[in-house]
């Protein structure tokens, strides 16, 4: 099963909004075929394994990291294909909570006499597909916080001048995160200061991510790089009640999708998350600035964190601080499964968000 999970990992960033799935066919104590779901719309892991095995699939045991599907989607149902291939038994890590599946695959297999065992490495499999499971089970996406910090705890210069904090290796990993995300979120302060594109560069682009700006007063420049590049990917401008109709009209004319959202705080993140999840978005990358990231954490919305810590020093009289300087625990955030990698002169620290300390002064979700 752990081999199946390793195979499933190969689909990360390619299969969404589907889950990552890996499978093996075992016969007479030997693996006769392997398969994984390689891309959205491509054959599922079970089908790939059956095709590779050919006649050797008959009488074999399938080990798969998720319950085989029993519905017609982009591809035919896997459970039916397993029956036709003549597999003798199936071992699956856990049930698929998708209401189109959710036990139906197991029931179909058992009705045809195939022995089914569930729960092998179930927690590890759920951890692998945590973003997918969250979207299916709660109707909310997986929020990924990402920021880069200088050694003196700054994310930018106060004057807004262009500033490169990390080196080339860290930038490649940051762009890879964008390339695997369904949406990239920033605040209006970042847009006004940096005029960013928010597209994936310097690495393989696996997704066409929505670019989302939290812009309560609709101040996004219609002539900026974001809206000049709408052909590269949709741009959402999330506005509040204070946004002028004239400003929203200009943004729509420039090609933006204007999302009017009255909520703030946790409600704001939940409302935006529900809208994005309804569009099939699973992984949402929140890049900043500092106040947006603090708000994401303080309202308990963040699921995963990536900190790129540089040896560079911003200096100056008053550099813009990150969410909590260089110590994420200062904001009450605890990470589990922490991994640390050296990227030339930078450190890449990432993990799942486990807990937070309630803040008595949480900021508004969509700072103006």
Image: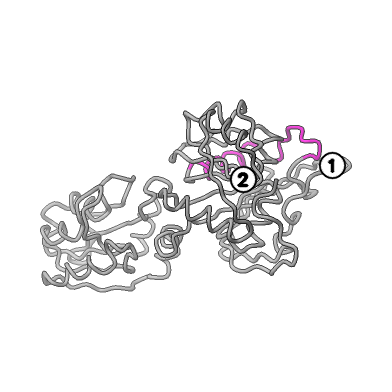
Residue matched to label 1: 315
How crowded pointer 1 is (Cα within 10 Å; few <14, some 14-19, many 20+) is rated as some
As drawn, which residue projects farthest toward the front?
Answer: 245
Q: What percent of the width, then of the height, locates residue 99?
A: 30, 64
Taking the image as shown, residue 194 lies to the left or right of residue 337, namely: right
Mark number displayed over residue 144:
none
Identify the image quadrant of residue 201. Answer: top right
How far across and how far down the image is residue 84, in percent? 10, 58
Segment colored magenta: 157-179
Label 1 residue SS: loop
Label 2 crowd bin: few (<14), some (14–19), many (20+), radius 10 Å = many
- Toward the viewer: 261 or 312? 261
C-alpha distance separating marks 2 and 1: 28 Å
Q: Is residue 71 above or below residue 192?
A: below
**Residue identifier under label 2:** 214
Residue 25 % position (x, y): 22, 60
Q: Which corner quadrant holds the N terminus? A: bottom left
Using the rendered view, name the quadrant where residue 190 is placed.
Answer: top right
Helix, strand or loop for disc 2:
strand
Is residue 139 placed above or below 162 in the rendered structure?
A: below
First-in-chain label (2 vs 1): 2
Magenta span includes 166: yes
| Residue situated furthest right in the rendering | 317
Residue at horizontal 42%, vertical 52%? 278
Quarter of the picture holding the C terminus: top right
- The image shows residue 179, relative to residue 71, as above or below, that is above
Q: Position of residue 140 (x, y in %)?
A: 47, 58
């Amino acid at each position: 099963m752990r081999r199946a999970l390793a195979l499933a990992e190969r689909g990360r960033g390619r299969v969404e909004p589907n889950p990552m799935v890996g499978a093996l066919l075992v016969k007479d104590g030997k693996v006769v075929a392997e398969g994984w779901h390689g891309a959205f719309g491509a054959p599922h892991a079970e089908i790939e394994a059956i095709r590779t095995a050919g006649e050797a699939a008959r009488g074999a045991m399938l080990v798969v990291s998720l319950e085989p599907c029993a519905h017609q989607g982009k591809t035919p149902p896997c459970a039916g294909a397993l029956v036709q291939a003549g597999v003798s038994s199936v071992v699956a890590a856990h049930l698929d909570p998708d209401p189109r599946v959710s036990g139906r695959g197991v029931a179909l297999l058992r009705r045809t006499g195939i022995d089914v065992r569930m729960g092998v490495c179930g927690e590890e499999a759920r951890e692998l597909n945590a973003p997918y499971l969250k979207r299916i089970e709660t109707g909310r996406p997986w929020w990924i916080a990402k920021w880069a910090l200088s050694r003196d705890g700054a994310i930018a210069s106060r004057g807004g001048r262009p500033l490169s904090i990390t080196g080339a290796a860290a930038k490649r990993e940051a762009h890879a995160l964008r390339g695997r995300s369904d949406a990239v979120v920033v605040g209006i302060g970042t847009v006004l200061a940096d005029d960013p594109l928010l597209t994936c560069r310097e690495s393989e682009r696996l997704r066409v991510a929505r670019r989302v700006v939290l812009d309560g007063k609709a101040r996004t420049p219609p002539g900026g790089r974001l809206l000049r590049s709408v052909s590269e990917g949709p741009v959402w401008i999330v506005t509040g009640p204070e946004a002028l109709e004239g400003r929203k009209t200009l943004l729509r004319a420039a090609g933006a999708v204007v999302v009017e959202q009255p909520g703030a705080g946790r409600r704001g993140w939940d409302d935006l998350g529900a809208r994005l999840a309804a569009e099939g978005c699973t992984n949402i990358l929140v890049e900043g600035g500092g106040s947006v990231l603090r708000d994401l954490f303080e309202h308990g919305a963040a699921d995963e964190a990536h900190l790129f810590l540089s040896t560079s020093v911003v200096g100056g009289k008053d550099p813009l601080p990150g969410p909590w300087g260089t110590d994420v625990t200062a904001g009450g955030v605890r990470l589990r499964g922490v991994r640390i990698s050296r990227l030339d002169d930078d450190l890449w620290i990432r993990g799942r968000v486990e807990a937070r300390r309630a803040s008595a002064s949480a900021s508004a979700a969509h700072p103006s």
